[in-house]
Image: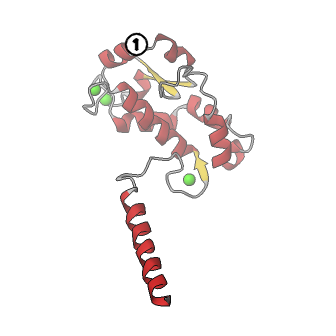
Amino acid sequence: MKQIALIVCAGLFIAHLTASESSEPAAPEPTVDANQDGKVSHEEFATHHAREVFTYYDVDGDGKITKKEVEQIHQENPAHAGAAKATLKHPDIDKNKDGVITPDELEQAAKKSPDVKTLFHGISENAPKDNWVNQAEYDSWAGDTSFDPEGQGLPVMSISF
Ligand SMILES: [Ca+2]
Ligand SMILES: [Ca+2]
Ligand SMILES: [Ca+2]
């Protein structure tokens, strides 16, 4: 009797392992707290939102944002550019002056942007001193989606050309 119970238990355990393995996503969701230390640093904040904004504007997914793509996006969602919490300006982003924006250029611009820094510091009163906010503070801030009233997954920041 004991043996049967043991076999059933083992069987359930294996079934459980298999189930949890197969339900695991191929790639984990990118979180803003990249190093998973429970704190969102200014750098993590800028990097995360730069990536989000890049995906949104790179319409054809070729790894570059052109003026045409920015214009197309702004035509599709005219209210978003004005409602976004911070704007990155093309002359500040396009460091090599080739007219297109690369992910690296956008990430560097977001890290250096005083507007992004102000935005980040606005999340928590402690942020200017500590230069990080905790996940709960970040989540409560991220819950304000007034720039995205229809829940279309619009980014927090916009690009101006
Ligand atoms: Ca972190
Ligand atoms: Ca593109
Ligand atoms: Ca460029």
> At 41% from the left edge and 22% from the top edge, which residue is drawn?
91
Closer to the camera in the image, 138 or 88: 138
Across and down, in percent, residue 121 comes to 66, 37
Tell me: 138 left or right of 78.
Answer: right
Answer yes or no: disc 1 within 8 Å of ligand 2: no
Q: Is residue 106 in sight in this rendering?
A: yes
Three-letter code, disc 1: Glu
Q: Quadrant of ligand 3?
A: top left
The x and y percentages for residue 59 are 31, 24
**Residue 132 visible to an observer of this rendering:** no
Mark 1 nearby-residue class (10 Å; few <14, some 14–19, many ≥20): few
For the point 59% across and 27% down, the residue is 145
Front-most of residues 105 and 60? 60
Residue at x 50% of width, y 17% of height: 80
Question: Which residue is at the front of the view, 2 or 51?
Answer: 2
Image position, residue 127 (x, y; %): 69, 43
| Element type where label 1 sits in the image | helix
Where residue 18 sits in the image (x, y, percent)? Answer: 37, 66
| In the image: residue 23, left or right of residue 141 | left
**Left or right: 126 as drawn, with respect to 14:** right
Q: Is residue 107 above or below residue 146?
A: below
Residue nearest the observer in this picture, 152 or 49: 152
Q: Name which residue lies at 49% across and 36% down.
A: 49
Residue 4 versus residue 57 in the image, above or below: below
Q: Which residue is mark 1?
A: 76
